[in-house]
Image (cartoon, rainbow, N blue to C red):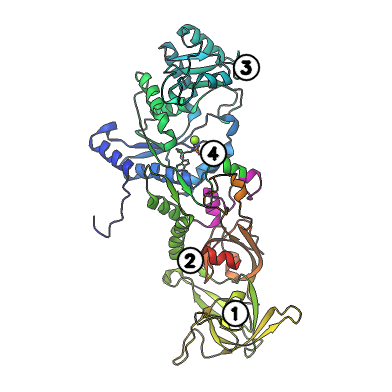
Amino acid sequence: MTANEPSKPVDFIRTIVANDLEEGKNGGKVVTRFPPEPNGYLHIGHAKSICLNFGIANENAGGICHLRFDDTNPEKEDDEYIKKKKKDVKWLGFDWQKKLFFASDYFDKLFEMAKVLIKNGDAYVCGLSADEVREYRGTLTEPGRNSPNRDQSPEVNLDLFLRMRDGEFPDGKYILRAKIDMASPNINMRDPALYRIRRATHHQTGDKWCIYPTYDFTHCISDAIEGITHSLCTLEFEDHRPLYDWILNRLESELKQHPQQIEFSRLALDYTVVSKRKLITLVNRSVVAGWDDPRMPTISGLRRRGYTPESIRNFCSKIGITKSPNKVEIGFLEGCLREDLEKKALRAMAVLRPLKVVIENYPADKVEAITAQNHPQQPEFGSRTIHMSREVYIDREDFLEVAPNKKFKRLVTGKEVRLRNSYVIKCEEAIKDPDSGEIIELRCSYDENTLNANPEGRKVKGVIHWVSSNHCVKAEIRLYDRLFTQANPEDGGEFLDYINPNSLTVLKNCPVEPSLSSAGTGDTFQFERVGYFCKDQDSTPNYPVFNRAVTLRDSWAKISGAS
Ligand code: ATP
Ligand code: MG
């Protein structure tokens, strides 16, 4: 590979797929699937799985990745989640073409497959209660015990199973179980449940069924029906693989394909949680404003925060695919965003904590239109007009009466600084509130020969951002910090105890360039010297709202100290 070639991801799964292709396995096809359950929003962990499954399909000629909703738990699922998940997968840049499926599409087929198992003596209807089933299951050190129904004839089992479907029994009265081995060291193989009676209206099939197949029974058969070649899942399914293979082996004469299940490690991010149950808790307890709160690690939260699909895909590619624990620093994700926005985001000026500056020798009725480049390295991004006038706002952080050290390149009394894209100004006097002593205004002068130039002999080290007080709009700016105070909120104790009470700081009426009010929702800018910001959906024509996507540098400590 030459240095200029984009590096193609390599990992153990891609190696397996490449070897299979070379050996002519699966008729030279690559078919993967992404199988979310419609019971929550997609999060950054799902993005890893999406990038892997769609990535492998896209990298191989003729490869395809199906989107399949794994919808076997009707009580917890909802159509709304389906819509949101489809939107998120598309937004990430992936296309399932026409291959959109639901596990519930296969309920009839699954029912037939269960009957095949029953007829072959591989499954039976068990009348133990849920508690008894648990008790009979045994433990990691003790084998389980056989259900009293285990040796019933296929005829009896078939009759009971049909009556289960026909609604003759109350919920929980019977389950259909695979007849495998109650003494197996793998508890998943101790006659696992295949079907349960559950009177629940299903978002796809309505009230057609009162029995629903379990995940383990459904998943392998759905994969086989769709001709999946490589069924990629996270490591917690490793112990389910023997069951996946057992079911498909027993149904070999019915199903042509036997996909290969391969496991990889789940992604975890520090200072956040990605378990769906915990994310739901954050939403239900109003810790955050919703699934798409910009502090959430959901795709919709990240999008609202200002993440780009490219930055998330790049992140997923960089973290790679292995079987080792995959806990990643949140700073790494932010770095991927910064890298992308540095190239793409238009520049603009915004003042987060305004301090008024009156330029005393600048005529009160004068206004100058100045052309400012939208991006320092990308002339094709064009330019915009900003206005200079006698009164401007600068950031409070950019002024101190006395420089604390030589590194301080901002404005101090008696010294000069350049207003970005404009003149060099000098601070003559800081006006204070007589009661509080707080600095409320600066009196400055400007050198009219310095517009956007640095004449010989004058050295002005500092450049600060500013906005003209008569040519600005006021905006709300939302600054985000980590959602949790602990890197591992899930380790020990209740994760809700570690919520960061300062994860959101709202700054109101911040002066920003007027051009920002016409930006579209989701547009991202670099507010010069401040960070990357994304226009939020809460904006109104008169009052734009911006979310801080990420700071300019990896400097959490400094930023949170300042806020
Ligand atoms: P949770 O355990 O949080 O409820 P899940 O695994 O049940 O998540 P699904 O909707 O079933 O969520 O996930 C769809 C796919 O995404 C599965 O193949 C799953 O393995 C994968 N996935 C889920 N979470 C992660 C993660 N953190 N890292 C990588 N892949 C993940
Ligand atoms: Mg799951």
The amino acid beneath tag 1 is Phe
C-alpha gap between disc 3 and disc 4: 30 Å
Label 4 belongs to which residue? 82
Cα separation, mark 3 vs mark 2, equals 60 Å
> Magenta part of the protein: which range?
282-307
Amino acid type of disc 3?
Pro
Tell me where residue 35 appears, x and y as whole percent.
Answer: 46, 36
Residue 198 part of the magenta segment: no
Amino acid type indicated by mark 4: Ile
Q: What mark, if any, has residue 553 been given in the picture?
A: 2
State the residue position of label 1.
399
Q: Identify the mark at residue 48; answer none if there is no mark.
A: none
Q: In which quadrant is the N terminus drawn?
A: bottom left
Q: Earlier in the sequence, mark 3 or mark 2?
A: 3
Magenta region includes residue 283: yes
Between circles 3 and 2, the one closer to the viewer is: 2
**Residue count near mark 3 (Cα–Cα under 10 Å), binned few <14, some 14–19, many ≥20:** few
